[in-house]
Amino acid sequence: MAVTFSDLHTEAGLKALDQFLSGKSYISGSHLTKDDVKVYAAVAEKPKADLYPNASKWYEAVSAKLAPSFPGKAVGVRIGGLATPAEAAAPAADAKASAADDDDDDLDLFGDETEDDKKAAEQREAAKASTKKKESGKSSVLMDIKPWDDETDMKKLEEAVRSVEMPGLLWGASKLAPVGYGIKKLQIMLTIVDDLVSVDNLIEDYLTAEPINEHVQSCDIVAFNKI
């Protein structure tokens, strides 16, 4: 049965992860799996060893396993939606203050609300809804794309993959990683708009369908995170 972890940027989420990892080396057994990579990607930073000893030890182990595949020096990035409780508190307070200001703007101090006042209020609400819609509904995906054999031209494979274009799909960074027996796989990042792109359909209808399946043998989702 699949295990669900949520709010891993909060104390409650990290505590639940720490409890789950008690007596365990990895999420799904004694070896690193895609489950570990997915959870690792959702944890903003290394959990504190004094508060979450099991999660901290697991984080270090996964970091050590992944390091050889990503030898470059990271400069550090922040992912939207992963703010700590303290960081989230200030924007929340500002939002409440802003909402209070908006409510004050809608008050008619001199009598009944006029048609112009109603129209202005409707426009403000529409603008708020539009902004919320634009700020949500995107996901970042890491995908493994494997060729048929060691004779597959990986440059042509990547060109074929990137030739897939559709509204809401943006291809990102990529690299080749060894699989074994001289075979390499393509690891590639992509960003999608959830309402416009289905990753399952992208794989089934495009990446593993003609003519791209001439180069591509299979596709696996390594990590899938909301932005």
Image (spheres, rainbow, N blue to C red):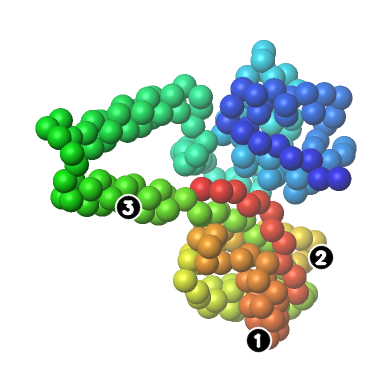
Q: Nearer the viewer, residue 213 or 154?
A: 213
Does the rendering let one see residue 32? no
- In the rendered image, the residue lying farthest to the front is 112
Q: Quadrant of residue 12?
A: top right
Residue 203 locus on image (x, y percent): 67, 71
Q: Nearer the viewer, residue 204 or 98?
A: 98
- In the rendered image, the residue lying farthest to the left is 110
Q: Amino acid at mark 2?
A: Tyr
Q: Amino acid at mark 1?
A: Pro
Q: Quadrant of residue 143?
A: bottom right
Q: Which mark is residue 122?
A: none
The image shows residue 13, relative to residue 178, as above or below, that is above
Q: Decide if residue 9 is on the left or right side of residue 62.
A: left
Query: Which image quarter holds the N terminus?
Result: top right
Labels 3, 2: front one: 3
Q: Residues within 10 Å of mark 2 (few under 14, many from 20)?
A: few
SS of the residue under disc 2: loop
In the rendered structure, are the residues bearing label 1 and label 3 in contact, judged by CB atoms less than 8 Å apart? no
SS of the residue under disc 1: loop
Cα–Cα span, label 1 and label 3: 44 Å
In the rendered structure, are the residues bearing label 3 and label 2 in contact, judged by CB atoms less than 8 Å apart? no
SS of the residue under disc 3: helix
Q: Which residue is mark 2?
A: 181
Q: Decide if residue 123 is on the left or right side of residue 222.
A: left
Q: Which residue is mark 3?
A: 126
Residue beneath the point at 64% across and 78% down? 206
